[in-house]
Amino acid sequence: MVDPQSSPTSPASSDVQALGVEALDAEGRALSDRRPAPSPALDVGVPRWVRSTAVYSWAFVGLALATAGLAYALAWMATVVIPLVVALFLTALLGGPTGWLRRRGLPSSLAVVLVLLLTMSLIGGAVLFVEQRAVAEFGSVDFSLDQGLEKVERGLTSLGFVSSQQLADAAAAAKDQFLSGPTRLPEGERTSALLTGALTGFSVLAEAALALFILFFFLLEGDRIWAFFVGLVPGRHRDDFDAVGRGAWAALRSYLRGITLVALFNAGLLMVALYLIGVPLVRSLGIVMFLATFVPVVGSYLAGAVAALVAFAFNGGTDALLVIGSVVVIAQVEGNLFYPRVVGRRVNLHPVVIVLALAAGTTLAGIVGALVAVPLAAMIAAAGSHFRSRASGGNDPQTPVAGSTTGA
């Protein structure tokens, strides 16, 4: 090995090395001149961890304010945002059947129209079934609301926590408020209430029409719409934007399809339990359970509470307790066996995150916010999985596989 200190050096190479050192020194001085000088007020007597905590705290406050501002802006534009979100979620559910019809040779527009007609028929039939069946079953057992309230009142007063007069006053107030409607209002307020109801109905119909319009084009040209938005992103961020969007879309599709199967599972088991116990309104309560399951964690228990109340009003306390026990067993089987297998690891949210998302969604947008909060949280979690995978240089096991934006 040759000792570098004993190696001969030519004058030319010495000049080159000197010039290189001077160039590096000049570059370092230029960088130091551009770097802002530290503030003495921050450096003197303030530990580094305090400064870091302050920086991150201000960043968190700014992010929280921006998020709150965006949430309230979306709530202010609810007449546009709600139909858009509904159309987006229905696209995730109906994209699969639409793609199946396309692969069988049907034109895209015809496949979309057939899927939409079938979906509207199913929804309308379910609504009519619940209404007519509930009325028929209530009439067949000769049940009235007053008799049910009296039975509930006797059960509660026997516990000694409330008096019969307090329950009677509360029931009368509830009946006047929710059952009498505008027919018992003074003449001036009656007209105002009727006008408000008409405007509300018109607004609901307008939002439903807008959601149907958006849904049609999402199913028909979802890929083209997504490609347009991807093209608006600068080139160096385009791949990340596309990967995050497709991952979030895959998570949304997995969640909605999985929760639909879970809802069918819960509704079927509850109907079997109610039939064996002998509770009326079996099919109607099954549909209530199906719809309530779309509100995770708490929805199935709320539907179970409704079923238990019906059992108590018709059959007594023993059957009500049996219904409560059945609901608990169904929730345990669903949560520990069925839900993990159906939804899988693509949507892996902690129960605390789900409850917080439900609380935030309900506070901001009521029942609509409760329905969309968890799917949106799943999409955000999927987007975060992409960046975690990129930072670690590997594949995150929870990162959804990118797929078609329309589900076709």
Image: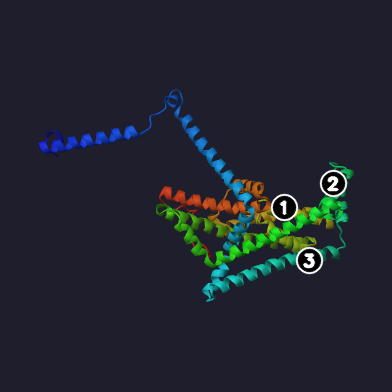
Residue at figure coordinates x 60%, y 52% from the top left: 374
Rendered view: 173 above or below 334: above
Which element carries disc 2, helix, strand or loop?
helix
Mark number displayed over residue 133: 3
Side of 164 where 127 appears, left or right: left
The image shows residue 111 at horizontal and vertical percentages of 57, 72
Number of numbered tags placed on the structure image: 3
Residue 171 shows up from this direction: yes
Residue 9 shows up from this direction: no
Residue type at tag 3: Arg
Q: Which residue is mark 1?
A: 302
Q: Who comes first in sequence, dot 2 or dot 1?
A: 2
Residues tagged 2 and 3 counted as in contact (Cβ below 8 A): no
Q: Residues within 10 Å of mark 3 (few under 14, many from 20)?
A: some
Q: Who comes first in sequence, dot 3 or dot 1?
A: 3
Mark number displayed over residue 176: none
Residue type at tag 1: Leu
Furthest toward the bottom, the residue is: 105
The image shows residue 325 at horizontal and vertical percentages of 74, 53
The image shows residue 247 at horizontal and vertical percentages of 50, 56
Rendered view: 51 above or below 356: above
Rendered view: 115 above or below 231: below
Q: Which residue is mark 2?
A: 170
The image shows residue 234 at horizontal and vertical percentages of 42, 53
Quarter holding residue 263: bottom right
Q: Nearer the viewer, residue 136 or 82?
A: 82
Furthest toward the right, the residue is: 165
